[in-house]
Image (cartoon, rainbow, N blue to C red):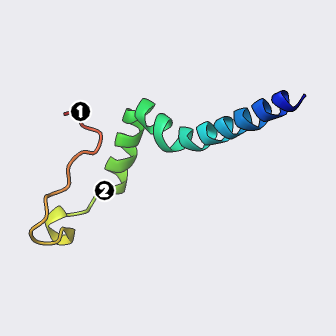
Amino acid sequence: MAGNRGVLIFGGFIAAVAAALYPIFYHPMTHVDEYKKEQSINRQGVVQEDVQPTGLKIWSDPFSRK
């Protein structure tokens, strides 16, 4: 009886962590095109040289594969 309770608590903890990580990590990695489209809409009209601090690397595509 006590062993089952421990398994349920531990399994619930693992499920909660997985549920929290899904929208942060897994979903963006599986829907790259959707996020690229959203970023292109959000960055319309932004001139990088006007907003980029001097001496820093220019923005790059966070979804590009290296």
* Numbered label tally: 2
Quadrant of residue 12 in the image?
Answer: top right
Image spot of residue 50 (x, y percent): 17, 71
Q: Residue furthest front?
A: 2
The dot on residue 5 is none
Q: Which residue lies at the image location 83% right of the left edge and 27% below the top edge?
A: 4
Describe the element under mark 1 as helix, strand or loop. Answer: loop
52 versus 23 height, above or below: below
Image spot of residue 29 (x, y percent): 41, 34
Q: Amino acid at mark 1?
A: Arg
Image spot of residue 9 (x, y percent): 77, 38
- The residue that label 1 is drawn on is 65
1 or 2: mark nearer the eye: 1
Circle 1/circle 2 CB separation < 8 Å: no
Q: Amino acid at mark 2?
A: Arg
Quadrant for the C terminus in the image: top left
Q: Which residue lies at the image location 20% right of the left edge and 55% below the top edge?
A: 59
Residue 45 vs residue 32: left or right?
A: left
Quadrant of residue 5 in the image?
Answer: top right
Q: Residue furthest left?
A: 55
Q: Which residue lies at the image location 13% right of the left edge and 66% below the top edge?
A: 49
- The residue that label 2 is drawn on is 43
Image spot of residue 57 (x, y percent): 13, 59
